[in-house]
Image: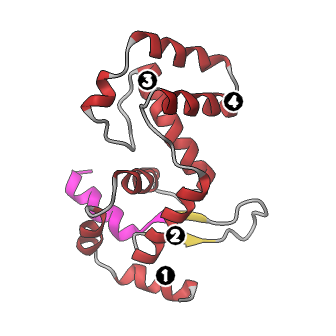
């Protein structure tokens, strides 16, 4: 299927159909799609991954509610003061180093396992095939292979139902 056919298919799906598909996704798939829905712009795989790590980091360090991921009671109960202090010690690092170290701590403490770049890209391509996500290659960027955005019909449907 060509990119043009995929794009046509994505826009033919109604918001209600897309919402039904959204509800069938796994937690990881929903988290990745939530990044695109809440940011309301096209993002690269790297940007999506960084936002997921930053979301957990900000929750742990600043007690800010997560934007993209629903936290389970077991995750919330596993966050003790010692772990929070360890995450707060990462503040002095540059953003790239902080994300690498935060991702290690998230995995070591069993809080979250952030998917690899390849896994995120694979999930995004599946979401593109389903019509939930739109993929395009930016014309002016040499480094970015592709950017992904949530289907506008899905954003409209979810925002209407959430009263935004």
Q: Which residue is mark 1?
A: 7
Which badge, 2 or 3, is on the more N-terminal residue? 3
Say whether residue 82 is magenta: no
Mark 2 and mark 3: Cα distance apart in space = 30 Å
Say whether residue 57 is left or right of residue 65. right
Mark 4 is surrounded, within 10 Å at the Cα level, by few (under 14), some (14 to 19) or many (20 or more) other residues, namely few
The colour style of the image is secondary structure
Q: Which of label 1 and label 4 is nearer to you?
A: 4
In the rendered image, residue 155, in percent from the top left (x then y), is placed at 35, 62
Q: Secondary structure at mark 2?
A: helix
On screen, 81 above or below 150? above
In the rendered image, residue 123, in percent from the top left (x then y), is placed at 48, 63
Mark 4 and mark 2: Cα distance apart in space = 28 Å
Say whether residue 78 is left or right of residue 116. left
The part of the chain drawn in magenta is: 149-164
Which badge, 4 or 2, is on the more N-terminal residue? 4
Q: Which residue is mark 4?
A: 97
Q: Which residue is mark 2?
A: 125
Q: Which residue lies at the image location 24% right of the left edge and 59% below the top edge?
A: 160
Q: Is disc 2 in contact with disc 3, using a CB cutoff of under 8 Å?
A: no
Please tell me the numbered disc located at residue 134: none
Q: Which residue is mark 3?
A: 60
């Amino acid at each position: 299927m060509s990119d043009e056919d995929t794009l046509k298919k994505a826009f033919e799906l109604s918001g209600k159909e897309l919402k039904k598909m959204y509800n069938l996704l796994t937690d990881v798939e929903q988290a990745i799609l939530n990044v695109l829905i809440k940011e309301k712009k096209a993002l690269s795989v790297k940007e999506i991954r960084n936002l997921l790590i930053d979301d957990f980091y900000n929750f742990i360090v600043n007690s800010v509610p997560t934007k993209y991921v629903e936290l389970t009671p077991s995750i919330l109960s596993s966050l003790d003061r010692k772990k929070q202090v360890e995450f707060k010690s990462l503040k002095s690092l540059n953003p790239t180093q902080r994300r690498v170290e935060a991702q290690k701590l998230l995995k070591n403490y069993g809080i979250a396992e952030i998917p690899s770049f390849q896994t995120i890209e694979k999930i995004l391509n599946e979401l593109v095939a389903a019509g939930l996500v739109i993929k395009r290659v930016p014309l002016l960027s040499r480094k970015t292979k592709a950017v992904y955005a949530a289907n506008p019909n899905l954003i409209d449907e979810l925002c209407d139902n959430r009263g935004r």
